[in-house]
Image: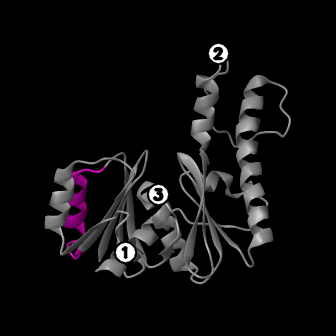
Amino acid sequence: MNLTIDIGNTRCKYAIIEKSDIIEVRIESDISLEHIREIVNNYPRVSKAILSTVRQIDFLIISQLESMFDAFVLLTEDTKIPIENLYKTKNTLGKDRLAAVVGANNIFPNTNVLVIDLGTAITYDFINENNQFMGGNISPGLEMRYKALHHFTRQLPLLEKENEFDLIADHTKGAIISGVQNGIIFEIEGYINLFNQKFDELIIILSGGDANFFDKKLKNTIFVNSNLNLIGLNRILEFNT
């Protein structure tokens, strides 16, 4: 039984995984030894753990994790992975992006897969049918776009996402919502259409905190998997232990 810990920009996800089955997922604002000890007490058969983080964390936590489990992996650019990584600047590649493409490859091996992660930023990452991670692109996420419009203008208000919005708005609030949310939809569909033209039998996977919000608003056939990073981390853990 394994523990995977995925620390993103705004939250920390813990998952208990047995073989390939996710037993429990727990979401907190940040990592803490108290949370980890509680999880271990609830699942005493956990013997291996992996940590991926996009933030700096206390070295004490790393040290404690190393002593708590029979095997512990801290995901870095030097960690062995079960795919070929063709990204040139591996030291700047987000660990969340790497975990996501490994997760996608675990579900759809030997397949062209475009992973679209809708989180703080929106990332587009591609792994080909030869199990090679080719790279991808990064753009501002949903909340970031709303904050940017408010921050860099004098009069536009700070808004939040809304389910109902039009193509053409006749008031400023609606214009912001339509511009931000339709902009993301058109961006995603544009990427999907271009990738479909270039790569045969392409699979699309949406992940991240805003995946379910945009899922039904897209025209293309896609898979949604909010635990893609956790699946990838578990695969990397098994590959290294």
Tags 3 and 2 in contact by the CB under 8 Å rule? no
Residue 46: say if magenta.
Answer: yes
Closer to the eye: label 3 or 2: 3
- The residue that disc 1 covers is 80
Between the residue at mark 3 and the residue at mark 2, the CA separation in whole angstroms equals 35 Å
Amino acid carrying mark 1 in the image? Lys
Report whether 58 appears left or right of 204.
left
- The residue that disc 3 covers is 93
> For the point 25% across and 54% down, which residue is it?
35
Which disc, if any, is residue 69? none
Percent x, y for residue 130?
59, 82
Amino acid carrying mark 3 in the image? Leu
Report whether 116 appears left or right of 33.
right
- Point out the tag, 3 or 2, that comes first from the N-terminus: 3
Amino acid carrying mark 2 in the image? Arg
The number of numbered badges drawn on the structure is 3
Q: Quadrant of residue 155?
A: top right
Report whether 211 appears left or right of 96.
right
Closer to the eye: label 2 or 1: 1
Give SS at disc 2.
loop
Q: Compared with residue 83, is residue 210 higher up or lower down, i.e. above or below?
A: above
Q: Compared with residue 35, is residue 177 higher up or lower down, i.e. above or below?
A: above
Crowding at mark 3 (Cα within 10 Å: few <14, some 14-19, many 20+): some
- The residue that disc 2 covers is 154
Report whether 30 appears left or right of 61.
right
The residue furthest front is: 88
- Point out the tag, 1 or 3, that comes first from the N-terminus: 1
Q: Nearer the viewer, residue 27 or 127?
A: 127
The magenta region covers: 31-47
Crowding at mark 2 (Cα within 10 Å: few <14, some 14-19, many 20+): few
